[in-house]
Image (cartoon, rainbow, N blue to C red):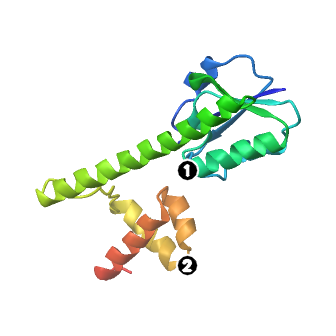
Amino acid sequence: MIKYYVRVSTVEQKLDRQLLAYDKADIIYSDKVSGKDRDRPQLKAMLEGLEKNDVVVVKSLDRLSRSTIDLLEITQEIENKGAILKIIDKDIDTSTPTGKFFLTIIGAVAELERENILQRIKEGISIAKEEGKYKGRKKGSIELKGDSLDRFIKFYKKGFNKTDLAKEFGVPRATVYRWEKVLKERGEL
C-alpha cells in the first residue's frame, strides 16, 4: 500500500503543492502542525498502521521532519515495520543502501541550514537593536471601550474565569490578564 504523508506548519497554509506532486497514493495522511513537533496525529496514525511492503512517500524531506534525529527515528520506525520511504524531490528510496546514505546526509544538511537561518536572524536582530531600529515584535493591543468594557467588568465581577472571559470576548487568555491588570491599576476592578 502506498501512503502519502503531507504536512504544512499552520492551519492557514495549503497542502495543494504537495497534493499535486503525487497522485499514486492509496491513502493520504495530512497534518497542519510544525515539523519540529513530533506529536503529529496523522504521522502517528500512519506509522502505527504501517505494514510490511508499504511505501511511505513524502514530497520533500522537511515535510517529514526538521530534525536529523527525528528523521532517523521516523525512518527507523518505517524500516522496522518492513516498509520503505521515498522522497519525491530528492529521488531518495530507502530500500537501497545509497538511498539510506543520502537520506542521512541530506537530513543533516537540512538541519544545519535551518540552524544557520536562525543564527542569522538572531544576529540581524542584535545589530538592529544596537542601531535602535528594532523594537521587538509589535504587540496586538485590543482596547476595551464602551459596552465591551462594561460587559467585561460585569462578567469579571460575577466570577467568570479567565478562560470563559477569553472565549466570550474572542481573545487569548493573555489579553484577559492584561485587561485585568490595566483595569485594576485604574481602580475599575
Q: Quadrant of residue 75?
A: top right
Is residue 62 at least partly visible in the picture? Answer: no
- Mark 2: give few (<14), some (14-19) or many (20+) Cα within 10 Å: few
Q: Secondary structure at mark 2?
A: loop
Q: Amino acid at mark 1?
A: Lys
Question: Does residue 14 appear to the left or right of 77 in the view shown?
Answer: left
Give above or below for 145 relative to 77. below
Observer-nearest of 181 and 55: 55
On screen, residue 113 versus residue 5, left or right, reads: left
Residue 53 image-quadrant placement: top right
Residue drawn at 32 percent across, 58 percent down = 141
Task: Name the residue tied to disc 2.
Answer: 159
Please say whether residue 92 is visible from this viewpoint: yes
Label 1 vs label 2, nearer the camera = 1
Query: As drawn, is 128 to the left or to the right of 75?
Result: left
Relative depth, front residue between 166 and 8: 8
- Secondary structure, mark 1, is loop
| Residue 188 found in image quarter | bottom left
Relative depth, front residue between 154 and 129: 129
Number of marks in the rendered image: 2
Residue 50 to residue 170: above or below: above
Q: Which residue is mark 1?
A: 36
| Three-letter code, disc 2 | Gly
